[in-house]
Amino acid sequence: MYIDIVKDRPKWQDLYKLAVSAVTPRPIAFVSTVSATGIRNLAPFSFFNMVSCNPPILMFCPARTRDASKKDTRINIEETREFVVGTVNEPMAKAMNQASAVYPPEVDEFLETGFTPKPAKVVSPALIGESPVNFECLLHEVMEFESGPGGGCAIFGKIVAIHVDDKYLADDGLVDHGKCASVGRLGRDTFSNTTNLFDLPRPTV
C-alpha cells in the first residue's frame, strides 16, 4: 500500500482509521475537567504523551467532532485553564470506554460511569480515584491545526502536581508496570496492556 497524501487526497476519516491502526500502542489520557458552571466532565483521549520534563509538560489531542464542534473537555479547559489527566489500567477499561460516549454537556460522567472523584490539591477538577497516577495541570497552550470536522488540536498542560497510588509503586519508587497493567489503544475496537514485558539495556558505544 502507498498513499500520496497530496495527490490522492484521502478522506480524513480513512486516514484516521489507518493511522490509529499503525501508531500503536497509544497511552490513554483520562481527562477530568469542570465547566465554568461547575459541571464535572470525564473523557478518554488516546493521542496523549509527555513532551517535556523541564518544564513538566504533557499533551493530549481532542479533535473536533464530525460537525466541527469543540468537545466539552476542550471547552472546559479553555474556560477554566485547568485539568487533570489520569492514567488507565485494565480494571478501569470498560468504564473508561463508556466515558467516551457522547454525553450532553450537563451530564456528570463521574456519576454515569461510577468513577470516584477526589479533591485535587492545586486545581479545581477532580482526581480520578481509580487511576494509578493523576497529573494536575494548568493550561499552557492550545494549538489548533484545523477548525473543520475532525480538525486536530493539541492541548499542552503544565504539570503542577502528581499523585501516585502507592500500591502501584516498585521498590525503586517508580511505577511498577506489572502491577499497574496500563491500558493502551490500538486500532478498531482493540486495546492492549503492559503485562507482557521485556527489557533492553540502554546501549553504549
Image (cartoon, helix red, strand yellow):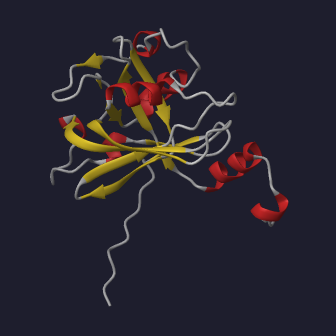
How many marks overall?
A: 0
Rendering coords of residue 134 (x, y %): 28, 35
Residue 87 left/right relative to 122: right
Question: Could you say which is closer to the camera, residue 181 or residue 30?
Answer: 30
For image coordinates 59% across by 55% down, the residue present is 23
Residue 146 left/right relative to 178: right
User: Relative to residue 179, is residue 129 depicted above or below?
Assistant: above
Residue 9 left/right relative to 128: right
Q: Quadrant of the N terminus?
A: bottom right
Rendering coords of residue 111 (x, y %): 41, 9
Q: Quadrant of the C terminus?
A: bottom left
For image coordinates 22% across by 27% down, the residue present is 123
Q: Is residue 3 visible?
A: no
For image coordinates 41% across by 13% down, the residue present is 114
Rendering coords of residue 32 (x, y %): 37, 26
Q: Quadrant of residue 160?
A: top left
Rendering coords of residue 80 (x, y %): 32, 26
User: Relative to residue 177, is residue 118 depicted above or below?
Assistant: above
Residue at the limit of the structure toward the bottom, as seen here: 205
Q: Is residue 31 visible?
A: yes
